[in-house]
Image (cartoon, helix red, strand yellow):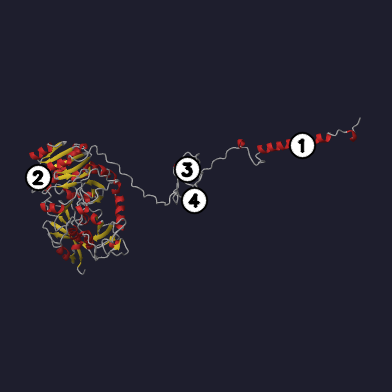
Amino acid sequence: MPVTARNRSPYRGKLVFTVFFILICCAGVWLLFLGQMMGTDTSSKADPSILKPLPVPRLEKESQPGILDPSMEEPFPVQIPKTPRITQPPEELEEEAPPHPPEEPTLTHPEVKPPPQPQHQGVPKADLSNAAIVVLAFNRPQYLTQTLDSLFKVAHIDKYPVYVSEDGYDTSVAKVARDHPIKELIQHPRKPRFSGQTGSAFLAQHYKWALDKLFFDFGHSHVIIFEDDMIFSPDILQYFEQLGGLLDADPTLWCVSTWNDNGFPELSSDPRRLMRVGYFPGLGWMLKKSLWSELSPNFPLDHWDHWMRLPHISHGRECVVPEVSRNYNIGLNGANMNPSDYERLFRGIAYNQQADIDLGDPSRMVKKNYDAWLTGLMHQSHIVPARAVVSLARGDKSTPAGAAMFPGGTATWPSLDQLGVGDGERVVTATYLREEYPGLADQLHIWPVPRGHHDHVLVLHWHDHRLWVILADARHSPFLPESLRVGPSPGFKMIAGRRGENCDVACSRNGMRCEASHFDWVNNCTALSQFFPCENGYGLVVGPDIPNYVSLDSDKQARKCLITEQNPQCGAAHLATERLCPCLPRTM
């Protein structure tokens, strides 16, 4: 029977609706699944289990310095920030640091100090395992006894072989040597090499023989040279050990010495302070075998220490010396000593009596570092006239002279008490001319010729007055500004005289006059070599007729060019020499 509306089931409509609703839900679920598979985000929350991780980007140059990409094999170069970055101590860091620090970090300290200045690279210590000590002696057993007694009390003496080299065969000297625990006594046959040979010549020849023996025959790498009239500071060998590496690190240094020519008590207070000096000091020094191999073939027969000071021998090389000497000279008489000079220049020298002095980082003595220190010291200083230096060194509280700040500007200088820099130390610079130096040195109670200088600058420290004095040669110091430099006068000319002719005559013969203040421009090896052949080299001697060339073949200095530390005179002459003269126009 056909179905009619009247006889339909009442649940038929509900069933259709239910089936239709189920189909709609299934379709929605299917569409959601397709969307996920095709990458279409149809939900606000994606399932992390089915998403691939994004690659970590590499940091570019503009990224924050110091944040490294863990995927990189090597870190990229860290940029230096323009402003300091404050990093928390490890205990203050959170478990996970953010990938980038905040642009404006919070300071954890009330004050940010500037970064420290770069420290000098340390100088490696010298290998002194094959070094030796030699004590040169002649005929003074009483001095030698004091010297060896003192030497064998210093620290580290057991590390070094000690030789005594005797010039001759004095039995009393040999006995003193053998009574001490020396390595060996070596004896040099004392025979003159030329007529009229003096004590200084015997000493020079003994020096060469002894150093040839220790370096070439015994094969030592370094030799420390003492003489038989010294007593020693307890740290003298430690001093050499701390500074020996400089001879390897800096080719502008050729020796380490324990002697300060100007080490008088008022100028010697700090046993740690060191200086570079261009004037060879000798008197307790160390050199390397490589240097002796250079010097030995031409070592002079006389005045060996003067020879070491010649520019064509030193080639600008310097020695390191202490402010407070590490040895004391007891030799009232000797080959180069007389009682008058000893009393004036040696008896009063102070020497260190403290043990185990730590000298600090020796790289401050490398030339570029030392030059930087000296330049800085000079730029702190007041320019004062030389007479003011004398007054200040005496401790005068007032001086009539004015002062200008280096290198320019003005400043008043009413008294010693008001002249202060930094922590209270006073620093002054005074220029001098060579011919004025002896008078200045006499008033300051220092050596009468420039000794202890570096590039024509001498630094002295009067510790009682907390006063640093810088004496600079106005003609030759490269540290002075042009405004303080002094050059030759207009029309200056160097003229070579004839044999036996003084400079007044030589200049006059050329229509000029001799100017004694200009000898400083001609009293040097470079000037002499422009006019004379100087076949036998150069010599540093004493005499008013210097500079000159010895043209008389019968003279013991024949064919040498001679210079002097003293002030030459226009009117002096020598029958064996031809002078080099400083001449100016007569109208000046």
Circles 1 and 3: CB distance less than 8 Å? no
Reading the image, the residue beneath label 3 is 93
CA separation, marks 2 and 4?
83 Å
Q: Which residue reaches farthest top?
A: 1
Residue 313, image x and y in percent?
Answer: 21, 49
Between circles 1 and 2, the one closer to the viewer is 1
> Mark 2 highlights which residue?
192
User: Which of the two labelled residues, at mark 4 and mark 1, occupies the earlier sequence position?
Assistant: 1
**Amino acid type assigned to the residue bearing label 4 in the image:** Glu
* Residue 117 vertical position relative to residue 182 in the rendered view, above or below: below
Q: Secondary structure at mark 2?
A: loop
- Name the image quarter holding residue 562: bottom left
- Going by the numbered disc 2, the residue's amino acid type is Pro
Choose the circle earlier in sequence order: 2 or 4: 4
Q: Amino acid at mark 3?
A: Leu
Can see residue 392?
A: yes
Of 435 and 525, the residue lying toward us? 435
- N-terminal-most mark, 1 or 2: 1
The residue identified by callout 1 is 21
Q: Work out whether mark 2 precedes mark 3 in sequence or the reverse, and give the earlier one.
A: 3
Nearer mark to the viewer, of 1 and 3: 3
Q: Earlier in the sequence, mark 1 or mark 3?
A: 1
